Amino acid sequence: MKLLIAVPTYNEIENIKRFVITVFEHIPDYADILVIDDNSPDGTAAAVEDLIRNYPNRLHILNRESKQGLAAAYLAAFEWGLSRGYDVFLEMDADFSHNPKYIPEMIDKIETNDVVIGSRNISGGGVEGWSALRNFISKGGSLYSRLVLGCPIKDLTGGFNMWRKSALEKINLETISAKGYLFQIEMKYKAFLAGCSITEIPIIFTDRKQGKSKMSKGIFVEALINIWKIKSNARTDKGSFEFIKFAVTGGLGTVTNLVIFFIFADLLKLPEIPVSICCFIVAATQNYIINHHWSFRNRTESDKPSIKKWFLFIVSSLLGLGINILVMRAILTYFNVPLKLIAQAGGILAGMVINYAVSKFLVFRR
Ligand code: GDD
C-alpha cells in the first residue's frame, strides 16, 4: 500500500510544523504527506519547505497561486497522488481537529473497505470545543443531507476520510462539481451511489486551538440549496434510463438484422443459416458500439471499445438469445397462449434482461 495524506492549508503557520511532526509519529513508513497550500500570506508554505529537509521524499508541497477552496485543494491532491502511484488517500485538516491517533485504525479498516469515514455522528464519536450553535448546525446539516439524498452515511460533512484509489475512480473526480464544504457530501454520496463499501469509525473532532476556521455562515445557507443540485447531478451521472437506452439499442439492432437478412437471403438468395449468423454478428457489433457510447456512457468514460469487450458482448448476446429461445419454448409448453408471438415477446424480454445484466456487470463494468 502507498498512502498519501493530503493536508490543505490556508494560514496554518501556528499549526503546520507541529502537525507534520506529530503525523509522522503516527504513520507507517509507506505513508507520505502532501500539503496543498493556496499561497497563504502567513508563510505556511515556507515553513513546510523548511521541514521537507527533515523528511526528504516523504513530505511534499503543492504550491498554488491563490485561495481556491478546500474542494479544489483536495482534487489537486488526488490528481497529484494518482499520477504518482499512490493507492490510498487520507483527507485531513492541518489544525489538529482530526487527531492523528485515528490513522492506524483507518489504515486497518481500508484493507477491507473502499472508503473509511472518521465519524462524529456514530456511537463513540463526537465534537469537542464547538459552540452549541455550531454543533446544532453541523448535526442538522448532516441529518438534512441524509434525508434529502436518502444516503445512510452518518457523517456526510466531515473532512477526515480515507479513500482507496478504486473508490476515487468509481466516483470519477471529473464529475465533482461542489466547490466549498459541500465537496465532502458530494464525494461520499457519489461513493455510496457507485456501490463502494463504506465504513465509519468513531472520532472525536477537536475544534482548533490555533488559527481560525475559514468556514463562513453563508456556506451553510448555500449548502441547503445546493444539496438538491448534487442530488440531481449525481443521478444523471449514475446513468438513469440505462435499461431504456439498452432496449432502444437492441431494437435498432433488430432492424439492422432484418434489413441485412432481407437483402442477402431474400434478394440475393444466399443460404439463410450463414446469412443469419452474419446478421447476428453485425447487429450485435452495432449494439456494442452504441451501448459503449450511449447506454453505458457513464461507465465507459475512461475506456475505449476493445476486442475483448466486444467478444464478451457477443457472448452475452448469444446467452440472451439462448434464454430467449428457452423462455419462448417454456411459455409455449406450459401456458396455453393464443399466439406464438406472445411467447416470443416473453422470450425477448427475458433474453434482454439477462443480456442487460451481463453487459452492465461484466462487459461495461466500471
Ligand atoms: N489549500 C486550502 N485552500 N486549504 C484550505 C482552504 C483553502 O481555500 N480553506 C481551508 N483550508 C484548510 C485549512 O487550513 C485547514 O487545514 C482545513 O482546510 C480545514 O479548514 P477549516 O477552515 O479549519 O475548516 P473547519 O474546521 O471550519 O471545517 C472542518 O469541518 C467541516 C465539518 O464540520 C473541515 O474538516 C471540513 O472539511 C468539514 O466539512
Image (spheres, helix red, strand yellow):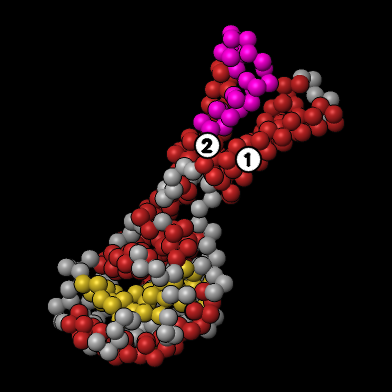
Seen from the viewer's position, the closer of residues 349 and 223 is 349
Q: Is residue 338 visible?
A: yes
Query: How far from the left and from the top, in percent, is residue 124?
Result: 53, 84
For numbered disc 2, what is the local secondary structure? helix
Q: Which mark is residue 316?
A: 1
Side of 144 relative to 195 (left or right): left
Q: Residue at x 30, y 61 (%)?
A: 179
The residue that mark 2 highlights is 288
In x, y percent, where is residue 246?
Answer: 54, 36
Question: Which contiguous range is marked in magenta?
Answer: 261-286
Please report the residue visible at 35 percent of the width from the left and 90 percent of the height from the top.
22
Determine the main secondary structure of the stretch shown in magenta. helix
The amino acid pointed to by label 2 is Tyr
Q: Position of residue 270 (x, y in %)?
A: 63, 13
Tell me: is circle 2 under 8 Å from ligand 1: no
Q: Which quadrant holds residue 70? A: bottom left
How far apart are the two marked residues, 1 and 2, measured between alpha carbons? Answer: 10 Å
Secondary element type, mark 1? helix
Residue found 60% across the figure and 17% down from its top: 261
